[in-house]
Amino acid sequence: MANDKKYSSLDNALRILNLYSAEQEEFGVHEAAEQIGVAPSTAHRLLNTLRHEGFLVKDANQYRLGVSILALGAVLQSSTPLIHASHEILKELSIHTNETAQLGIRQNGHVLYINGANSPDPIGYHAYEGQKFPLHTTSAGKILLAQENPEAIQHYFQSIDEQRTYENIDYILEEIRTKKYAITNNEPYSGVTSVSSAVKTRSGKTIAAIEVIGPSQRFSRKKLPQFIKLINEATEQLSQKVK
């Protein structure tokens, strides 16, 4: 019996991925539909979306795990120490700012959030580990992008066909490098503001960004300097832990 309305498309896609095991490495459309309780047409759409993104491959009407799973596994393996080291730091930052604190790393042209601590305030931004956005659309992404050389930055904007955005970004990224923090308003969602600072290795290489994010009305001019101070302290603490 189909239960499409109980889960979002994202939920069902993740439920399909969770079906795979060493005991069962392949699924057909009808088998996957039956396992997660959706219509075959829904399962077919989800399987093909996952195939398009590289998480599955299709062979003789059977779907098995694809190379994107391996890529995520490599990201997770390399980022695990960073995740463990950031838990308490993000929690304390969230408590002191009363906003959500997140840790993001670069994954190709995106910022991938790998850890977070939700705001103590019930009305706030909710952190989702595994969520990702194009680099230029979040403060954490801008911090990561600002560390690149001009050729890499130009290549990034050409790859996403945002030449107009690129033409206006030079000043913004230079300002970020000078101030050592980034702020975005109404990105990635309307009514949301975020502030970020970079996590660096001993050699000065940026490996991640800590971001505080929440409703724009709570990021007043009076609060921003304190938020920036707290974020800079958090990134320094994490930088010390991962050096």
Image (tube, rainbow, N blue to C red):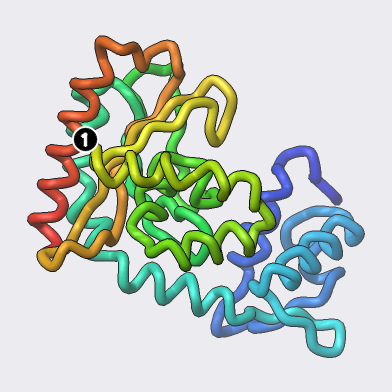
Q: Is residue 46 above or below residue 54?
A: above
Residue placed most toward the observer, 116 or 239:
239
Residue 147 can be seen, yes or no = yes
Figure quadrant of residue 124: top left
Q: Position of residue 117 (x, y in %)?
A: 32, 37
Figure quadrant of residue 81: bottom left
The residue tagged 1 is: 231
Residue placed most toward the observer, 198 or 165:
165
Q: Is residue 197 left or right of residue 163?
A: left
Q: Amino acid at mark 1?
A: Ile
Q: Is residue 123 left or right of residue 232?
A: right
Q: Position of residue 80 (x, y in %)?
A: 28, 65
How many numbered dots are placed on residues in this image? 1
Q: Secondary structure at mark 1?
A: helix
Residue drawn at (80%, 45%), measured in percent from left and top?
A: 4
Residue drawn at (35%, 45%), measured in percent from left and top?
A: 174
Q: Position of residue 115 (x, y in %)?
A: 35, 49
Residue drawn at (43%, 38%), measured in percent from left and top?
A: 127
Q: Position of residue 144 (x, y in %)?
A: 37, 54
Residue drawn at (43%, 49%), measured in percent from left and top?
A: 141
Figure quadrant of residue 243: bottom left
Residue farthest to the bottom? Answer: 60
Residue placed most toward the observer, 167 or 76:
167
Q: Is residue 190 left or right of residue 209?
A: right
Q: Is residue 224 above or below residue 11?
A: above
Q: Is residue 241 above or below residue 108?
A: above
Residue 114 can be seen, yes or no = no
